[in-house]
Image (cartoon, rainbow, N blue to C red):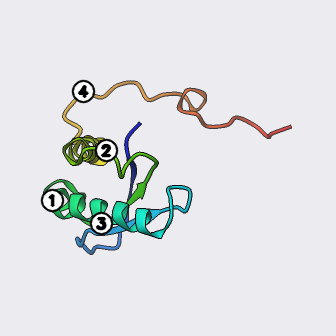
Amino acid sequence: MPGFVLLMRPRDDGDETMRIGFTVTKKIGNAVVRNRMKRRLRALARELLAERGVAGADHVLIGRNGGVERDYALLRTELGKAFRKVTPQPDNATPTQTPTPAKAGAQMGKRP
């Protein structure tokens, strides 16, 4: 399990500025531990956000248990993977059959 969660949401407001936020809950530890985790997340974002972030989007890094003790190089690798997952990929592939609403996870009808 990674030491953080990365959330990304496009703003669709025409502004290409990338914004970032950090949060670490009290479950992680006291203020000293939470602030250390936020410093590590800020350092990671400073390294990777400019080259791998999504322009015009808000990014949020949520610190998780074990993130403080985790090796910095490992956190950097995990953040790189997370950016690859949230970055929109160009549609160069051939069009495939679109999934039916039931397969896509949409609910059919009303809940009982």
Give the residue pinned by disc 3.
Answer: 39
Q: Which mark is residue 70?
A: 2
Tell me which amino acid carries mark 2.
Arg
Of residues 73 and 104, which is closer to you in this image?
A: 73
Give the residue pinned by disc 4.
Answer: 94
Residue shown at 24% from the left, 38% from the top: 91
Secondary structure beneath label 2: loop
Tell me which amino acid carries mark 1.
Glu
> Measured along the vertical axis of the image, is residue 29 above or below residue 64?
below
Tell me which amino acid carries mark 4.
Thr
Local packing at callout 3 (Cα closer than 10 Å; few below 14, some 14-19, many 20+) is some
Tell me which amino acid carries mark 3.
Arg
Secondary structure beneath label 1: helix
> In front of the other: label 1 or label 4?
1
Q: Earlier in the sequence, mark 4 or mark 2?
A: 2
The reply to whether callout 2 and callout 3 are in contact (CB within 8 Å) is: no
Q: Is 62 positioned to the left or the right of 41 in the image? A: right
> In front of the other: label 1 or label 2?
2
